[in-house]
Amino acid sequence: MPETLQYVWDDIATYGDAKADRRLIPGGAGDLKRVMVKAGTIAPRHDHAFEQFFMVAEGLGVLLCEKGEIQLHPGVVIHFAPFTWHEARFETDTVIYEVNFRE
């Protein structure tokens, strides 16, 4: 039978470190994540084995990737194919929503 689930971000347990408040909602084919990043945080160069979209909801930063430097600000949406390297610097407190697809 089809199922509808409802979530409230503030009711979801956090994980990670002091630099970011991460909350994850798992799905069947992928996950939805809200990441609240503190100003000054640097995400070192990395990649993922999975496809990812992320959208900046609040804040400012800079993304470095194979395309070069991309300014992050509200409304910017980024798509990474699997194994696409990237790194980021967050200039202000920033809220990002990610969709991560399972392999």
Image: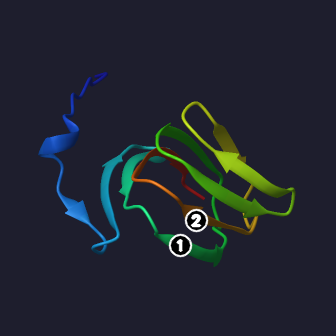
Which amino acid, by three-letter code, is at mark 1? Ile
Q: Is residue 35 above or below residue 56?
A: below
Residue 85 versus residue 91: which sits nearer the camera? Answer: 91
Say which amino acid is labelled 2.
Arg
Residue 80 seen in the figure: no
Image marks 2 and 1: residues in contact by CB distance under 8 Å: yes
Q: Quick one: quadrant of the N terminus?
A: top left
Q: Position of residue 41 (x, y in %)?
A: 46, 69
Q: Residue at x 17, y 56 (%)?
A: 13
Residue hosting label 2: 89
Q: Quadrant of the C terminus?
A: bottom right
Q: Is residue 19 left or right of residue 68?
A: left
For label 1, count other residues whose C-alpha is less than 10 Å away and answer few (under 14), some (14-19) or many (20+): some
Mark 2 crowdedness (10 Å alpha carbons): few <14, some 14-19, many ≥20 = some
Q: Residue at x 21, y 34 (%)?
A: 7
Q: Dot 2: what SS?
A: strand
Distance Cα–Cα, label 2 vs label 1: 5 Å
Q: x, y percentage for residue 71?
A: 69, 48
What is the number of the mark on residue 101?
A: none
Q: Secondary structure at mark 1?
A: strand
Give residue 57's position: percent from left, percent from top. Answer: 46, 36
Q: In the displayed structure, does residue 103 sit left or right of residue 30?
A: right
In which quadrant of the rendered view does residue 45 lie?
A: bottom right
Q: Position of residue 2 (x, y in %)?
A: 31, 22
Q: Which residue is mark 1?
A: 42
Is any atom of residue 40 visible in this view?
A: yes
At x 67% / y 70%, what residue is drawn? Answer: 47
